Image: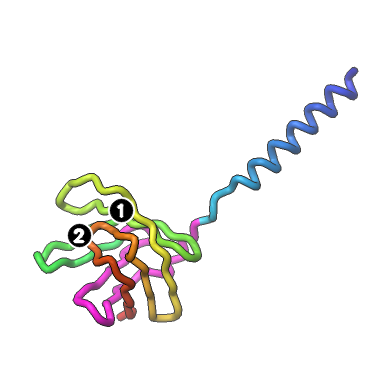
Amino acid sequence: MKIRINQVIFTIIIVFLIVSVSCEKEKKFPDGRFIGTWVSVDKRDSLIFISDDILMRPAADGIKHTYIYNYTNDSITLQYKGPYLILVEPSTHSYFLSGDNLEIDFTNGGYGFDRDVIDFKRE
């Protein structure tokens, strides 16, 4: 009987480990890859990544709007947290980063951004 209980406990632990590993979300990479100022190549737009989770976006109204963000190897999620104090759902966008070139696909919408693919160059 004792051996059977140990087998059941062992089986439960193995199943739990398999499920928890297979359900793991894609890892986030707080590695500073975006930190710095990025200026749009073809629009009047810029992004200032000040940390691995906060970016500022200067607007035509002279206000620097704040966004919080997180990212994985192929997507970035932005949420507006600026001075207008409005609740905006986060939006996730694919991106491509190569050296000092950054392309973010906003075609699915994102608060304050044109529905377009925007190319940025690091200053």
Examine the residues drawn in magenta and state their main secondary structure: loop
Q: Position of residue 63 (x, y in %)?
A: 13, 62
Residue 122 to residue 25: above or below: below
The span from disc 2 to disc 1 (Cα, nearest Å) is 11 Å
Q: Nearer the viewer, residue 112 or 9?
A: 112
Magenta part of the chain: 28-54
Is the residue 53 above or below the residue 18 in the image? below
The residue positioned 40% from the left and 57% from the top of the image is: 70
- Dot 1: what SS? strand
**Would residue 83 be counted in the magenta stretch?**
no
Mark 1 highlights which residue?
79
User: Residue 112 appears in which quarter of the rendering?
Assistant: bottom left
Callout 2 secondary element: strand
**Viewer-side residue, 44 vs 69:** 44
Q: Position of residue 6 (x, y in %)?
A: 84, 26
Residue at numbered disc 2:
65
In the picture as drawn, the residue positioned furthest to the left comes out as 61
Identified at 33% across, 65% down, the residue is 107
Residue 42 drawn above or below residue 30 = below
Dot placed on the residue nearer the N-terminal end, 2 or 1: 2
> How many C-alpha atoms fall within 10 Å of the one at disc 2: few (<14), some, or many (≥20)?
some
On residue 62, the disc is none
Horizontal side of 74 relative to 44 (left or right) equals right
Q: Nearer the viewer, residue 45 or 49?
A: 45
Q: Amino acid at mark 2?
A: His
